[in-house]
């Protein structure tokens, strides 16, 4: 599905990612965990084409994408829900979801894609006529993910999907994300808090100062004291 191989990424003169490699398989949920500023968002933004690696490669289904533009990468099958949700405040909830079908008109019918998005987060139908700022933070997270799903992607990139959410809303967001894999999609998410990593994550990467310091099953990370010292108190 997705293969990121030894990428180095600079932002101006700062070396942000150092030989980062990771992979996401079919119907797999992978999580990158690290403290704020460790490089998690940079990984996702580089995959989406907002940033370009100075070296290394990124492939989707065997096709190189690291030199492509963002809209081309989206058309190839990657959806992105940013940390700030990125919803359009002047549009209604329904229009925010529908815009994905306008920007990618090909593929399965728009009605099917919208039904899929609302099936994952049915509560959004209740607020369909509200403007973006009129829904809660948790609902904005759901909306951002639903909009990305309406692109009909094979892979979803979710940046901090649980950040800032109340404990009461986290299960609803988590259940929605879990259901996406049942639809045949793969997910790569980034999280700052190790305690927010959902139980259905199949593989975990830990990043610190732009370098991957752990890769493996989530159960194994708790046995690595050095890694836990890095992320155990992350927020």
Image (cartoon, grey):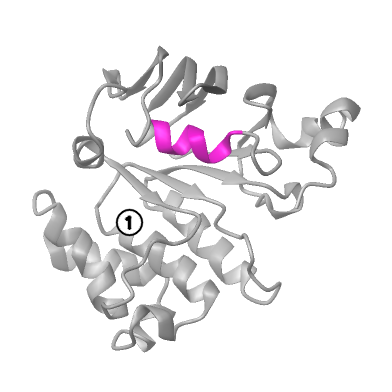
The residue under the point 25% across, 38% down is: 70
Secondary structure of the residue carrying numbered label 1: helix
Q: Taking 74 as reference, is 224 left or right?
A: right
> Residue 186 sits in which quadrant?
top left
In depth, the one of 85 and 29 nearer the eye is 85
* Residue that carries the numbered disc 1 in the rendered image: 149
Q: Is residue 87 above or below residue 128?
A: above
Residue 26 in sight from this viewpoint: no
Q: Is residue 85 above or below residue 107?
A: below
The residue under the point 70% across, 54% down is: 196
Number of residue marks: 1
Q: Taking 167 as reference, is 11 left or right?
A: left
Q: Taking 129 as reference, is 29 left or right?
A: right
In depth, the one of 191 and 178 nearer the eye is 191
The residue under the point 9% across, 54% down is: 105
Prevailing secondary structure class for the magenta stretch in the rendered image:
helix
Residue bounds of the magenta highlight: 39-46
Q: Is residue 43 above or below residue 104?
A: above
Residue 45, position in %: x, y? Answer: 42, 38
> Residue 110 sits in which quadrant?
bottom left
In depth, the one of 112 and 90 nearer the eye is 90
Q: Is residue 52 magenta?
A: no
Residue 124 in sight from this viewpoint: yes
Residue 39, position in %: x, y? Answer: 59, 33
Residue 203, position in %: x, y? Answer: 62, 33
The residue under the point 33% across, 75% down is: 89
């Amino acid at each position: 599905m997705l293969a990121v191989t030894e990428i180095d990424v600079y932002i101006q003169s700062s070396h942000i990612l150092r030989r980062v490699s990771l992979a996401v398989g079919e119907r797999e949920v992978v999580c990158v965990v690290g403290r704020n500023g460790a490089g998690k968002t940079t990984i996702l933004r580089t995959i989406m084409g907002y940033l370009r690696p100075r070296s290394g490669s990124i492939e989707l289904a065997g096709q190189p994408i690291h030199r492509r533009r963002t809209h081309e990468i989206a058309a190839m099958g990657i959806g992105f829900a940013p940390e700030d949700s990125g919803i359009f405040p002047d549009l209604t909830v329904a229009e925010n979801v529908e815009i994905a079908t306008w920007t990618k008109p090909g593929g399965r019918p728009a009605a099917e894609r919208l039904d899929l998005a609302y099936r994952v987060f049915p509560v959004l139908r209740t607020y369909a006529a509200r403007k973006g700022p009129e829904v809660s933070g948790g609902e904005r997270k759901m909306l951002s993910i639903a909009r990305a799903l309406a692109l009909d992607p094979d892979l979803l990139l979710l940046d901090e999907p649980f950040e800032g959410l109340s404990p009461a809303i986290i299960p609803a967001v988590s259940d929605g994300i879990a259901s996406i894999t049942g639809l045949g999609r793969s997910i790569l998410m980034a999280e700052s808090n190790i305690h927010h990593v959902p139980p259905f994550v199949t593989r975990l990467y830990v990043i610190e100062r732009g370098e991957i310091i752990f890769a493996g099953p989530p159960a194994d990370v708790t046995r690595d004291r050095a890694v836990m010292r890095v992320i155990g108190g992350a927020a």
